[in-house]
Image (cartoon, grey):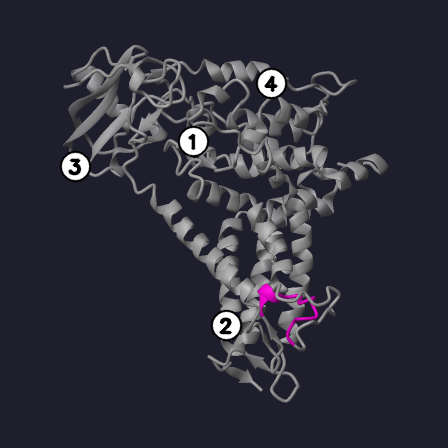
Amino acid sequence: MTSTRIPPASATPATAGRAAIAARTLRTDRWWLQPAVTFAVLFAFVVYSTVRAFSNAAYFVPAYDYISPFYSPCLAANCADGASHLGQPLGNLGIISPALLILIVPLGFRLTCYYYRKAYYRAFWLSPPACAVAEPHAKYSGETRFPLILQNLHRYFFYLGLVLNVILTYDAFIAFKGKDGGIGLGIGTLVLLGNATLLWLYSLSCHSCRHAVGGRLKHFSAHPVRYRLWTWVSRLNGHHMKFAWVSLIWVALADLYVSLVASGTLTDLRIVN
Amino acid sequence: MGYQARFRVWRGDDTGGDLADFTVEVNEGEVVLDIVHRIQATQAPDLAVRWNCKAGKCGSCSAEINGRPRLLCMTRMSTFGESEVVTVTPLRTFPVVRDLVTDVSFNYVKAREMPAFAPPPGLAPGEYRMQQVDVERSQEFRKCIECFLCQNTCHVVRDHEENKEEFAGPRYFIRAAELDMHPLDARDDRREYAQAEQGLGLCNITKCCTEVCPEHIKITDNAIIPMKERVVDRRYDPLVWLGNKIGRRG
């Protein structure tokens, strides 16, 4: 047996009577991998979506009514011809991309999402980078102060997100348009349908949704229908992280696909008409 | 087939200490607590370790194994490679008493501060009647064995000693949720208490408490987030506030 005694002053953080262990963590597994991957994927998405949101081009395919989820609903007069299914109440925004106004909703919804909070607090803010790995910050006030107290707005973004989901579902159905104007089916249709489905799964598995449908009740027995809804949403909620990632990646791929077809880089593969 | 494992065990007290190296026999089916006991029996008779049931139900033998908060009695040696050095240290968040034993009285202080179950008026003990669907959520939280691994791993106090006064920790958030969801608890200020007195807002839901819970209680998803949502109902949601004013809920 060998040992070298370390006085408690070397322990971090400065604490009253804690064991004097100088190492930031004694974890021997690859604890850094998960935050690193999270950082890389989220950062890539932020860069891609920012570029696409500002590009204000190649987001609508009139032949098949494919519209990118980043630009739907397109509510400005400077939207591409035929892309404004809900009219153009915002008038001409000039050089401002119509996507910027719409993306506030999904951005707010994902930014305040209970799962993403865990992901970016760990990966971007290192608070903490992983369990039992010391964070680098000297002070910590959590979600008690501005701006993080605004995380409590999550449910409002959830409600707005549901409206957006209805619109994106409509977009998926009008994408069943053939070359001659009748019914058709292309890869783009399936991509948009998959996008709408995943966004519904992500939204309905949300913790705020779980709370709204029944979680806030004290007596389930007095509300059997809401209890049933709560059990369904709870089941989905167990997969919330999975839906968060898959829907995020899919929405970017859906936008990419529409942009490639709209710009003529790719020809939409038609299955029917 | 047994083998000789290399162990590093933190030894010391509140005046200082360090990792001590041991080479010790490991046999098939053993857990880390068995090895610590073997070190105690053969090489370091004064090694202090707290333990009791050896079945993962008393919550006594909480420590950190290779930097991860675990129960010594529930960590199988077969999860480590034979050449791997196993490092055992005391819980970092609490004051050390000696070697692997820490003073967890912080948790008992927080427990005492928590308002107890308030019986409904007009019902005597023995007259309580509840339906199973109404108590299921609270029952999950009753599985807690009070090992305090969640309290230990929570960075709010682990990395910020100064937060200990205003932060009760995940173990007491599940207690708050248990009582707020309890069909017969008569108090209606559990949410205000959770926010104002327990420091619920300090939690940034990074889920480490859930990751380390040996009872697999979904602390974050089933207790902390629902409590945060309930606080939003009371404090930040005018629609729910209005609903409560004009109609009966829950």
Q: Chain of mark 3?
A: B
Measure the alpha-carbon separation of dots 1 and 2.
Answer: 41 Å
> Is residue A198 inside the magenta stretch?
no
The amino acid sitting under disc 3 is Ser
Residues indicated by labels 4 and 2 sit on the same polypeptide chain: no
Q: CA distance from mark 4 to mark 1?
A: 29 Å
Q: Residues within 10 Å of mark 4 (few under 14, many from 20)?
A: some
SS assignment at label 2: helix
Q: Position of residue A23 (x, y in %)?
A: 29, 28
For the point 67% across and 69% down, the residue is A170
C-alpha span from label 3 to label 1 = 35 Å
* Label number found at residue A137: 1
Mark 2 — residue? Answer: A257
Q: Which residue is mark 4?
A: B114
Quadrant of the rendered image containing residue B83: top left
The residue under label 3 is B83
Q: Looking at the rendering, which quadrant does residue B129 occupy?
A: top right
Q: Secondary structure at mark 3?
A: loop
The amino acid at mark 2 is Tyr
Q: Is residue B38 left or right of residue A265?
A: left
Q: Position of residue A2 (x, y in %)?
A: 14, 19
Dot placed on the residue nearer the N-terminal end, 1 or 2: 1
